[in-house]
């Protein structure tokens, strides 16, 4: 055994710390106790009733609402959302929120009224579908609780599109949803409407049920959503909306979305919202278009418009186009003419006087097609989501700048 430099003797311990059975036993006992406690907690959790587990999960989510920081939100899972909603978003391929969704969802989860303005196509639908689902989830809403969320849309097509988004995102929740838009038997709707938790509707049909359906009750309503509010008012539903609002409970949360902020929209906001949070995603949103939009115009004689349209479509057979006209009769006439001329691409028509089922079929057909042309009135200009459209043609000049913005 070597001598140390200071002259003192050095002795090697007979038992190494690593192989000391006492120390090893203490470490093993500590680890065993930790594992035992963990298993005990897991067994305790396993014996909890499902409602208690859900209640604790909801409580944890609600505690995180006040901590929402918009600057830290990158994907939908960064929001304090229920597992069922997150699963639905993933399955529907929704991962990254848009600006309107980032700014609106957090405020809505905190229970605040929201007045949102953003460009058409900015994702307003998902900005209210997610809070609607979370609102009912927090309340542990059931079928017997009746109507909890009411969504009012200006047109049947937009209501149908919203319903489809709700079906995709809310597929793992157990809430019942209904679409009430007219064009169907009123008695059939009346028989089912009282069992609906989330109702998506147009103003006229909703007011008709309020007047004629005895089982239709809105006293438990938790959330009112007004989608494309400016369009609702532009279509002459101002008095209808006033009548609807008078029949809704005062204690509710309201989300109002609009592409433009007009005086009539502000008047409606004053009637329906309480201390709202204003969300303005884009400056000068009233007259703004996407930055990537390329705009062109052609000057020609009136007699040459149809010839130029036919030539354009013949030269863009591998494209998807929408052509806007000013009236239903014009759409019908041009549609029949082009079906006879056979431009080499499928031609579809969408206008207000069509039967509801026909309009739905045309909408779904155009969405599915890779190459097609849709002749339409302004019924297709507001809020409808047509993916991968290459060209938007306005054969007739729109009535104002707002209509032009919504068409493109």
Image (tube, rainbow, N blue to C red):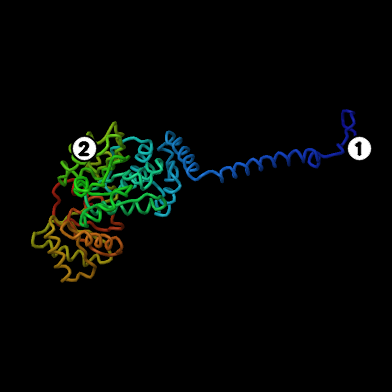
Left or right: 39, with 174 as reference point: right
Give the secondary structure at mark 2: helix
Return the residue at label 2.
246
The N terminus, quarter of image: top right
Q: Nearer the viewer, residue 211 or 69?
A: 211
Task: Give the alpha-carbon distance from disc 2 to disc 1, as whole Å.
Answer: 99 Å
Residue at (27, 40) in percent of width and height = 256
In the rendered image, the vertical position of residue 321 relative to residue 174, given as above or below:
below
- Counting from the top left corner in percent of width and height, residue 63 is at 46, 35
Residue 279 shows up from this direction:
no
| Displayed quadrant of residue 149 | top left
Residue highlighted by disc 1: 1
Q: x, y percentage for residue 361?
A: 25, 62
Quadrant of the image occupied by residue 392: bottom left
For marks 2 and 1, give the one nearer the viewer: 2
Tell me if 24 is positioned left or right of 34 in this view.
right
């Amino acid at each position: 055994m070597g001598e140390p430099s200071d002259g003192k003797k050095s002795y090697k311990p007979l038992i190494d710390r690593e192989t000391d059975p006492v120390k090893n036993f203490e470490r093993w006992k500590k680890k065993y106790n930790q594992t035992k406690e963990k298993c005990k907690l897991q067994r305790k959790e396993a014996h909890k009733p499902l409602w208690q587990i859900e209640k604790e999960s909801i409580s944890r989510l609600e505690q995180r609402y006040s901590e929402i920081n918009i600057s830290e939100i990158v994907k939908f899972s960064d929001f304090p959302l229920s597992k069922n909603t997150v699963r639905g978003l993933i399955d529907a391929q929704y991962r990254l929120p848009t600006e309107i969704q980032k700014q609106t969802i957090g405020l809505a989860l905190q229970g605040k009224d929201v007045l949102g303005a953003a460009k058409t196509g900015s994702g307003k639908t998902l900005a209210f579908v997610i809070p609607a689902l979370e609102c009912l989830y927090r309340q542990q809403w059931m079928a017997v609780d009746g109507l909890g969320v009411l969504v009012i849309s200006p047109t049947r097509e937009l209501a149908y599109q919203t319903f489809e988004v709700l079906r995709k995102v809310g597929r793992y929740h157990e809430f019942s949803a209904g679409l009430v838009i007219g064009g169907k038997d009123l008695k059939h709707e009346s028989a089912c409407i009282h069992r609906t938790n989330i109702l998506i509707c147009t103003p006229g049909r909703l007011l008709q049920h309020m007047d004629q359906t005895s089982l239709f009750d809105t006293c438990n309503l938790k959330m009112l959503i007004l989608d494309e509010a400016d369009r609702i008012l532009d279509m002459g539903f101002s008095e209808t909306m006033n009548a609807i609002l008078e029949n809704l409970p005062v204690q509710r949360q309201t989300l109002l979305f609009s592409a433009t902020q007009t005086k009539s929209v502000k008047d409606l906001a004053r009637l329906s919202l309480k201390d709202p949070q204003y969300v303005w995603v884009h400056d000068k949103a009233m007259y703004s278009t996407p930055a990537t939009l390329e705009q062109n115009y052609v000057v020609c004689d009136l007699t040459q418009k149809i010839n130029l349209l036919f030539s354009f479509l013949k030269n863009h057979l591998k494209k998807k186009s929408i052509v806007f006209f000013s009236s239903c009769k014009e759409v019908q006439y041009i549609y029949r003419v082009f079906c006879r001329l056979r431009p080499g691409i499928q031609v579809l028509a969408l206008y207000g006087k069509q039967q509801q089922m026909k309009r739905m079929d045309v909408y779904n057909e155009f969405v599915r097609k890779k190459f097609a042309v849709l002749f339409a009135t302004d019924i297709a200009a507001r809020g409808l989501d047509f993916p991968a459209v290459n060209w938007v043609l306005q054969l007739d000049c729109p009535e104002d700048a707002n209509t032009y913005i919504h068409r493109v």
